[in-house]
Image (tube, grey):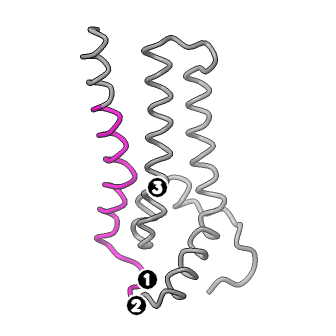
Amino acid sequence: MFKGPKNKTNFCALFLGPLWMGYRQMYFETFIIGCCVTLLGFLAMIYEFFSLTAISTSTIRGLNYALMGLMGFFGNYIYFLSLKRRITKGDEKIGVSKIGILYGFILGVLMPMAIAGATGVILMLLLGD
């Protein structure tokens, strides 16, 4: 299945990262990506609320684009490592899952949005804005 270089650009992973990862049943990896996106959201909120000059919104946006680019460039290799780990553990559910797209959406898109939104509301209530 993985003959040749594992670092070819995967356009599905590049443009639809969490959905592609969910489809490929890489739920742990999707969760990690969701945590990274949440962390970048926290950085953006800290910048907004405390007006830090050390970081800017363009820097945070650039980091988000870099994360997407890394997912696109290393998507096949991440999938290879995920398959290797699951085969070693004896997991019998290897392949693709249409319902996994929903899991990918929840873990990689909704979870970071919900956490960042709730944190923003809490910060606004605490700071009185």
Q: CA distance from mark 3 to mark 1?
A: 18 Å
Callout 3 amino acid: Leu
| Above or below for 123 versus 65 | above
Q: Find disc 2 in the rendering and name its residue.
A: 92
Identify the residue under disc 1.
Answer: 95
Q: Say which of marks 3 and 2 sits in front.
A: 2
Overall secondary structure of the magenta section: helix
The earlier-in-sequence mark between 3 and 2 is: 3
What residue lies at 37% left-to-right and 48% top-to-bottom? 109
Q: Position of residue 68 (x, y in %)?
A: 57, 48
Which quadrant of the figure has residue 96? bottom left
Q: Residues within 10 Å of mark 2 (few under 14, many from 20)?
A: few
The residue type indicated by label 1 comes to: Gly
Residue 112: which disc? Answer: none
Boundaries of the magenta span: 93-118
Query: Tags 2 and 1 in contact by the CB under 8 Å rule?
Result: no
Give the x, y percent position of residue 118.
27, 32
For the point 52% across and 88% down, which residue is it?
Answer: 87
Which residue is at a point 56% across and 54% down the rendered structure image?
14
Q: Nearer the viewer, residue 50 or 82?
A: 50
Report the amino acid beneath label 2: Glu
Q: Which residue is mark 3?
A: 16
Q: Work out how far the residue at label 2 is from the one at label 1, CA to CA, in angstroms.
A: 9 Å
Identify the element where label 1 is drawn. loop
Number of labels in the image equals: 3
* Rendered view: 90 above or below 12: below
Q: CA distance from mark 3 to mark 2?
A: 26 Å
The N terminus sits in image quarter:
bottom right
Q: Decide which of tag 3 and tag 1 comes sooner along the chain.
A: 3
For the C terminus, give its image quadrant: top left
Dot 1 crowding, Cα within 10 Å, few <14, some 14–19, many 20+? few
